[in-house]
């Protein structure tokens, strides 16, 4: 085997493979150059996902002919002078590789003109070979066209995705850049159709609203943290506003869009139990940190960076997000409701609707009048229930008498965080000492013995999942107890058969399980004795709940004490909460709403399901075709 030096054409194509992975890589490099040129208006146009045509136009400083000739040469850059400059870079680009790498695998045209020049310069390159350089008339700034990407590298072109996928990649990147530079007005034209436009007024909120609409912007929560040499600002959404991937999460470090596993992990931990396993909230975090503590020269496309102190950054991001998602004292329960999805507003009408029968016939008018009088009496009686003077709270089950429910599960009567000291005192909605009217929603009724319907303070309709809401209430109640959770001794100890893996789990986490209300000890080979259980669960469900907790512990990989505690408390709260099928009266509904409003994180249950959603007045009017 003989060693030889590669020719320039081969070298250029290899280098292009590191920088130009797909059309989105080209757009990234060109737009970042426009930003470095101090442009405040950038327009991007693509055709066929960027595979056949891409154009980036800016109103930046532009270049004279001398610099235009140099910029397409490898490692020609105006960003740095020497190696020490790498530790204090203020620009997005700095290597001088992008333009020659792009020109090596496409038909490349550069047109540029500085502000003080009468004429501009055009440079045309095909597959790395310069065709012509000449003076032309053009606007101030720079326009670069890239056509037939990978025309001379068919093996690379073969691995591109569909044009739709490639266009989506470009779209996602322009969105992230628009968030990182809200002072720049961005436009994206895809197949002659305007798909993105931002105002460029230096308002991140306005940029988010322009791209994702009012449905998302109305649910934004501001993030702000200043800690010595770390500053974090931006927006996150309430936990109910989620998507199935991280594609709409944007991380910005010193003005550069990046990806970072450590920052994503901090965000996930801050939301903790508020999200389902497959849900990701909207996030835009702008992190300003000492440039000397960040190495941006560790990735060919500068998409990842290396931090000097990752643990400190993790804590800062976690604190900033956790504080932002935590409700403020001024918020009402209606502020935590998730907006209804737009697709729910589109109701398909049958093509041939059945003819409606007359509401009244002559033979039925007397009967209808009697029914109307009876309904009026029922309505007046229901009004009296809205403000009872002294109401006890039995829960009626559709298949059981209410007194049996109360006798079997005293906790079912208790929605108060002070229940352990007031078990025998009947709850009363107008007892201001025990129940502050924190909720600003008026309960109207119940649907399918599962959902509470309420009216908002400014109109609209709110639907509350009674099980998820009570689950959140109980979880917060358990979590606030610093000592051991209140327990009930079992008169007859439960002897459970377990396998070796479950036995090992019980032995490993015995002290933690004890603190959480489960007093279990080994009672022989592959058997355990359960002596005590949390006071809020039924003894008849103790074995099922305990086994489900063991199963959830087995699913955790090297769980921390916090993860174990959360898993156990979430399971206990789920089993102790009221269920679908439990019939509630108005007083009980009001209690649930009041207690939910006083929880620390009322958005979701401990498993991440939303507790409350809202239909605004506009949503309702749209559903009934009153507005367009």
Image (spheres, rainbow, N blue to C red):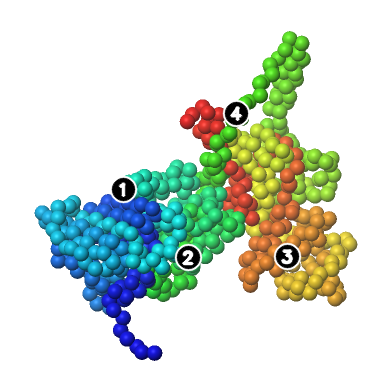
Q: Residues within 10 Å of mark 3 (few under 14, many from 20)?
A: few
Q: Mark 4 or mark 1: which is in front?
A: 4
Q: From mark 4 to mark 1, how far is it between C-alphas? A: 48 Å
- Which residue is located at x 62 percent, y 36 percent? 454
Q: Dot 1 lies on which element? A: loop
Q: Nearer the viewer, residue 417 or 380?
A: 380
Q: Which mark is residue 149?
A: none
Q: Earlier in the sequence, mark 2 or mark 1?
A: 1
Q: Which residue is mark 4?
A: 351
Q: Which residue is mark 1?
A: 201
Q: Dot 2 lies on which element? A: helix
Q: From mark 2 to mark 3, how far is it between C-alphas? A: 30 Å
Q: Which mark is residue 551?
A: 3
Residue sitting farthest toward the right: 492
Q: Earlier in the sequence, mark 4 or mark 2?
A: 2
Q: Earlier in the sequence, mark 3 or mark 4?
A: 4
Q: Dot 3 lies on which element? A: helix
Q: Residues within 10 Å of mark 1 (few under 14, many from 20)?
A: some
Q: Nearer the viewer, residue 616 or 493?
A: 616
Q: From mark 4 to mark 2, how far is it between C-alphas? A: 52 Å
Q: Nearer the viewer, residue 50 or 364?
A: 50
Rendering coords of residue 120 (x, y %): 15, 57
Residue sitting farthest toward the bottom: 1
Q: Dot 4 lies on which element? A: loop
Rendering coords of residue 127 (x, y %): 28, 66
Q: From mark 2 to mark 1, how far is it between C-alphas? A: 28 Å
Q: Which residue is mark 2?
A: 263
Q: Residues within 10 Å of mark 2 (few under 14, many from 20)?
A: some
208 vs 94, left or right, is right
């Amino acid at each position: 085997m003989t060693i030889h030096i590669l020719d320039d054409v081969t070298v250029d194509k290899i280098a292009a493979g590191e920088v130009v992975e797909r059309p989105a890589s080209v757009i990234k490099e060109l737009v970042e150059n426009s930003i470095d040129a101090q442009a405040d208006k950038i327009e991007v146009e693509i055709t066929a996902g960027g595979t056949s045509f891409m154009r980036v136009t800016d109103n930046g400083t532009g270049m004279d002919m001398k610099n235009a000739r140099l910029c397409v040469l490898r490692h020609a850059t105006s960003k740095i002078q020497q190696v020490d400059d790498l530790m204090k870079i203020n620009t997005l680009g700095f290597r001088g590789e992008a333009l020659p790498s792009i020109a090596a695998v496409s038909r490349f045209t550069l047109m540029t003109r500085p502000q003080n020049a009468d004429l501009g310069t055009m440079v045309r390159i095909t597959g790395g070979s310069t065709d012509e350089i000449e003076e032309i008339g053009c606007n101030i700034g720079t326009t670069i066209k890239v056509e037939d990407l990978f025309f001379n590298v068919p093996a690379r072109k073969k691995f591109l995705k569909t044009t739709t996928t490639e266009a989506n990649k470009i779209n996602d990147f322009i969105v992230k850049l628009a968030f990182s530079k809200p002072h720049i007005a961005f436009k994206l034209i895809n197949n002659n159709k305007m798909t993105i436009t931002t105002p460029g007024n230096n308002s991140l909120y306005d940029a988010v609203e322009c791209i994702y609409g009012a449905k998302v912007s109305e649910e934004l929560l501001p993030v702000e943290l200043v800690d010595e040499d770390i500053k974090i600002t931006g927006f996150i959404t309430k936990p109910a506003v989620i998507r199935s991937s991280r594609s709409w999460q944007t991380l910005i470090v010193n003005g550069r869009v990046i990806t970072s596993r450590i920052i994503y992990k901090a965000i996930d931990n801050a939301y903790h139990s508020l999200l389902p396993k497959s849900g990701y909230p909207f996030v835009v975090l702008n992190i300003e940190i000492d440039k000397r503590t960040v190495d941006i020269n560790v990735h060919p496309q500068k998409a990842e960076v290396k931090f000097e102190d990752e643990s400190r950054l993790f804590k800062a991001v976690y604190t900033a997000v956790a504080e932002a998602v935590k409700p403020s004292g001024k918020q009402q329960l209606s502020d935590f409701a998730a907006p209804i999805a737009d697709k729910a507003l589109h109701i398909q009408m049958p093509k041939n609707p059945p003819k409606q029968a007359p509401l009244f016939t002559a033979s039925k008018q007397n009967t209808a009048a009697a029914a109307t009088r009876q309904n009026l009496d029922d309505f007046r009686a229901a009004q009296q229930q809205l403000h009872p003077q002294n109401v006890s709270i039995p829960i009626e089950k559709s298949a059981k008498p209410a007194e049996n429910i109360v006798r079997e599960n005293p906790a079912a009567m208790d929605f108060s965080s002070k229940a352990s000291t007031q078990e025998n005192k009947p709850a009363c909605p107008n007892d201001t000492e025990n129940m502050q009217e924190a909720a600003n929603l008026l309960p109207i009724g119940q649907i399918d013995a599962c959902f509470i319907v309420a009216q908002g303070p400014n109109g609209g309709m709110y639907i509350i999942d009674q099980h998820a809401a009570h689950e959140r209430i109980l979880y917060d109640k358990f979590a606030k107890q610093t000592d051991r959770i209140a327990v009930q001794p079992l008169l007859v100890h439960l002897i459970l058969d377990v396998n070796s893996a479950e036995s090992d789990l019980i032995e490993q986490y015995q002290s933690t399980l004890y603190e959480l209300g489960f007093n279990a000890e080994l009672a022989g080979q592959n058997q355990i004795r359960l002596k005590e259980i949390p006071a809020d669960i039924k003894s008849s469900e103790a074995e099922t709940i305990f086994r489900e907790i063991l199963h959830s512990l087995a699913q955790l990989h090297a769980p921390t004490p916090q993860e174990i505690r959360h898993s156990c408390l979430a399971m206990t709260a789920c089993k102790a909460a009221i269920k679908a099928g439990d019939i509630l009266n108005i007083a009980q509904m009001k209690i649930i709403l009041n207690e939910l409003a006083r929880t620390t994180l009322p958005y979701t249950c401990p498993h991440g399901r939303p507790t409350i959603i809202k239909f605004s007045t506009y949503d309702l009017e749209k559903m009934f075709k009153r507005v367009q």
